[in-house]
Amino acid sequence: MLNVRQPMQVAQRAIILGAISFRASLEVTDHPRVAELSQKLLPWLHSLGIDDELDPIERALLETPIGELSASQQMDANWASESCSLFCWALTLTDAPDVAATVGGRRLLELLRILNPDAVSILQAATLRNVGELEATCKQCVLVRSALQEARVAPAVAEIIRRSNRQRLADVGITATEVDLQNAATTVAAMTPDER
């Protein structure tokens, strides 16, 4: 069985990742206030009482001045919206994310009330979807990602990736059947090259 985090923990991660996603958007925004807004993110997280939940990589990213993110930090910041979207779904704040679509950062900014003091209400009212829904979506995400990885390598390597990802699911008590694998492969096959 999936080890489900407490709703408050998931809400904290969603808000942190939302802040990082917003930071990523500031990096590519031409506006006189981007530096000012970027500098407000850490104090805002502190005001919510969740800045101690930042890992060192996240903290370093948020401390980095505008225009100075490394390529790795830019990639991490850009991917934060995808993870954030999944956490928002788990918290019942959104519908299930489309595995083939990129996430709109503006929607997350509004939904999580980034830089707004009333974001604390998200923490206070946090609830999670039922475990069955969480497990099914976890399985789908892992298997679609696996199918995407498998499509880029030789068949022998693809088999190692497939076994490894099935084992990762099994380690948390989620069984991936051949039908599940086929469904993931069908999802990937239906994606456009840009979506892949």
Image (tube, rainbow, N blue to C red):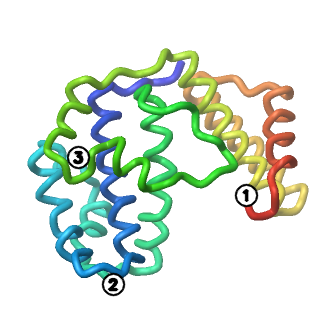
- Please give the residue where the numbered disc 2 appears in the rendered image: 67
Residue 169 location in percent, x, y?
63, 32
- Above or below: residue 56 compared with residue 84: below
Report whether 67 appears left or right of 80. left
Report how far apart the C-alphas of labels 1 and 3 lie in the structure.
32 Å
Local crowd size for mark 3, using a 10 Å CA cut-off: few (<14), some (14–19), many (≥20): some
How many numbered circles does the render carry? 3
- SS at badge 2: loop
- Above or below: residue 159 compared with residue 133: below
Residue 114 location in percent, x, y?
26, 51
Residue under the point 14% across and 54% down? 44
Q: Residue 27's image quarter?
A: bottom left
Depth check, mark 2 against mark 3: the one in front is 2
- Please give the residue where the numbered disc 3 appears in the rendered image: 53
Local crowd size for mark 2, using a 10 Å CA cut-off: few (<14), some (14–19), many (≥20): few
Residue 190 location in percent, x, y?
85, 47
Q: Earlier in the sequence, mark 2 or mark 3?
A: 3
Circle 2/circle 3 CB separation < 8 Å: no
Which one is in front, 132 or 23? 23
Report how far apart the C-alphas of labels 1 and 2 lie in the structure.
28 Å
Q: Amino acid at mark 1?
A: Glu
- Please give the residue where the numbered disc 1 appears in the rendered image: 195
Q: Earlier in the sequence, mark 1 or mark 2?
A: 2
Residue under the point 58% across and 30% down? 171
